[in-house]
Image: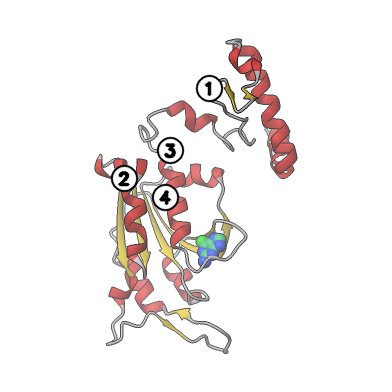
């Protein structure tokens, strides 16, 4: 899978892309990430990428010319999608991650300032995506979130394929509690059932715990699962 990230802060991505499983996958060429500096596509002396909004108001708006030129400079693969990261976008979730992971290439455009000129969306963007109901200074952190959520679907990325399926949200529920050794730590014991070796009982306990924590913290997810079952 190939990611092209368009940003005015390419340096933002350097360290996170070097670390951990993503860094390893990049070295192994299971994944490629190309960074594109939007400012390099500004044509004036000052390399201007933003300007004041028509109609007035606070903040700056990203100008259309450098942004559209930057998107158009990216070579396209067969199954490719151009995404604008913005707090006004469709909410990103695990279902969307799974769908986007089927693409060959994602072109991630990091919005900055108070927004981007609306015409950019018509000319050079297929989808607008938000990662949650809060405001970030720009789409850079959101682009990293999307890369990290998607690479987990690349075959061989995780090393342990089963864990992709089992984890939170894959079944629409939050994950059950986990324990490792020692069996007792500062007087706190690992639940007996997990030490029993009784696989059916362990599965039953985990299912109950997942339902309990989901009911407590995310009752909205339980409603979503119920609806999916009804519609199946
Ligand atoms: Cl994608 N961008 C910005 N600026 N803020 C956000 C966001 C994106 N998603 C949630 N908040």
For marks 3 and 1, the one nearer the N-term is 3
First-in-chain label (2 vs 1): 2
SS class of the residue under badge 3? loop
The location of residue 155, given as percent across then percent down, is: 37, 33
**Which color scheme is applied?**
secondary structure
Depth check, mark 2 against mark 1: the one in front is 1
Q: Tell how many labels.
A: 4
Which labelled disc corresponds to residue 182? 1
Q: Farthest front residue?
A: 186
Question: Can residue 86 be seen here?
Answer: no
Classify residue 109 by image quadrant. bottom left
Q: Is mark 3 within 8 Å of ligand 1?
A: no
Position of 64 relative to 140 (above/below): below
Mark 1 surroundings: few (<14), some (14-19) or many (≥20) residues within 10 A: few
Crowding near the residue tagged with mark 2, few <14, some 14–19, many ≥20 C-alpha atoms within 10 Å: some
Give the residue displayed 33% in from the left and 72% down from the top. 69
**Does residue 141 appear to the left or right of 39 in the view shown?**
right
Which mark identifies residue 153? 3
C-alpha separation, residue under disc 3 versus residue under disc 1:
32 Å
- Which quarter of the image is occupied by the N terminus? top left
Q: Nearer the viewer, mark 2 or mark 4?
A: 2
Q: Secondary structure at mark 1?
A: loop
- Distance between mark 1 and mark 4 Cα atoms: 35 Å
Q: Quadrant of residue 81?
A: bottom left
Q: Earlier in the sequence, mark 2 or mark 4?
A: 2
For disc 2, the marked residue is: 23
Q: Closer to the observer: label 3 or label 1? A: 1
Mark 1 C-beta to ligand 1 under 8 Å: no
Q: Could you tell me if residue 183 is visible in this image?
A: yes
Q: Residue at x 62, y 60 (%)?
A: 133
Between discs 1 and 4, the one toward the N terminus: 4
Q: Respond yes or no on whether mark 4 lies under 8 Å from ligand 1.
A: no
């Amino acid at each position: 899978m190939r990611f092209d990230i368009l940003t005015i802060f390419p340096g933002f991505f350097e360290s996170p892309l070097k670390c951990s499983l993503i860094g390893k996958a990049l070295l192994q060429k299971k994944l490629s990430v190309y960074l594109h500096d939007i400012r390099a596509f500004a044509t004036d002396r000052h390399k201007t990428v933003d300007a004041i909004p028509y109609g007035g108001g606070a903040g700056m708006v990203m100008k259309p010319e450098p942004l559209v030129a930057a998107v158009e400079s990216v070579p396209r693969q067969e199954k490719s999608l151009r995404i604008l990261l913005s707090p006004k976008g469709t909410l990103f979730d695990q279902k969307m991650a799974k769908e986007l992971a089927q693409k060959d290439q994602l072109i991630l455009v990091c919005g900055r300032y108070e927004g981007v000129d609306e015409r950019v969306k018509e000319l050079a963007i297929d989808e607008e995506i938000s990662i949650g109901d809060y405001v970030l200074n720009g789409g850079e952190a959101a682009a990293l979130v999307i890369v990290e959520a998607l690479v987990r679907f690349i075959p061989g990325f995780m090393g342990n394929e089963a864990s992709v399926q089992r984890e939170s949200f894959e079944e629409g529920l939050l994950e059950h509690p986990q324990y490792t050794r020692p069996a007792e730590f500062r007087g706190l014991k690992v639940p007996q059932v997990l030490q029993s070796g009784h696989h059916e009982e362990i599965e039953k306990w985990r299912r109950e715990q997942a339902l309990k924590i989901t009911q407590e913290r995310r009752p909205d997810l339980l409603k979503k699962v119920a609806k999916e079952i009804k519609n199946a």
